[in-house]
Amino acid sequence: MKRLKCYILTIVALFSLAGYAQTDPLNGKRIAVIGDSYVKNHVDPMENTWHYKFARKHGMEYFNYGINGSSMAYTSPRWGTAMYIRYKEMPDNLDYVFVIGGHNDSSKLDSIGGLDVFKERVGILCQGLIERYPAAKIYFFTRWNCKDFQGSNAEKIVDAMIEVCGNYSIPVLDCARQGGIYAHSDAFRKLYFQRPEDNAHLNSKGHDRFLNVAESFILKH
């Protein structure tokens, strides 16, 4: 099994507003984000991602466990160990855990063994995170939508994540339907994605747009 390259960054707040660090309840908290290229950020700098910007804004210690091509439920010879296994390589004593995934599982349902196996493995991930980080706040984020989303494997994966996370009382943001990211739109992708033909990877402007949605969801919970 390939050793994971973990990007660890201590976020130093650049703001000097009087009392901000003392009043922000997230300041100094430890956050780890595990996922696929939505987390690694594909070919763009990781510092452009919304979750890095969120951590920086709030003065948090940030750990990035994103791997391009990674799946939640499928261990790939090329892309490495599935998230439901490799979450164990994250550090102890985390205050926040974000799980961002499902995009690559959508095209690998046959290799995974079907939707029921996917749900079972996401359940293993949920239970494992709760047991390892009982005091942490855990959040899941689904993939974006896509062209012909309705009835597709992408929709099935999104709905499966929502169902399983609900069984474990874990908040999950349905980014496909509530994220404000129109990955099915050619015009939208030209503005907010790393490449016009890309339907997965936001550019810096796209991450800024989604940050507002994600931050509202996180702080609400």
Image: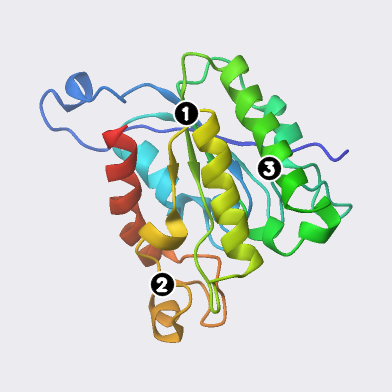
Q: Which of marks 2 and 3 is nearer the N terminus?
A: 3
Nearer to me, 113 or 192: 113
Give the labeled residue for mark 2: 182
Give the labeled residue for mark 1: 169
Give the labeled residue for mark 3: 119
Question: Which residue lies at the image location 89% right of the left edge and 52% below the top edge?
Answer: 77
Residue 50 seen in the current view: yes
Q: Residues within 10 Å of mark 3 (few under 14, many from 20)?
A: many
SS category of the residue bearing label 3: helix
Kind of residue sitting beneath label 3: Lys
User: Does 189 sit left or right of 113 as displayed?
Assistant: left
Quarter in which the N terminus is drawn? top right
Q: Residues within 10 Å of mark 2 (few under 14, many from 20)?
A: many
Q: Earlier in the sequence, mark 1 or mark 2?
A: 1
Kind of residue sitting beneath label 2: Tyr
What colouring does the structure picture have?
rainbow
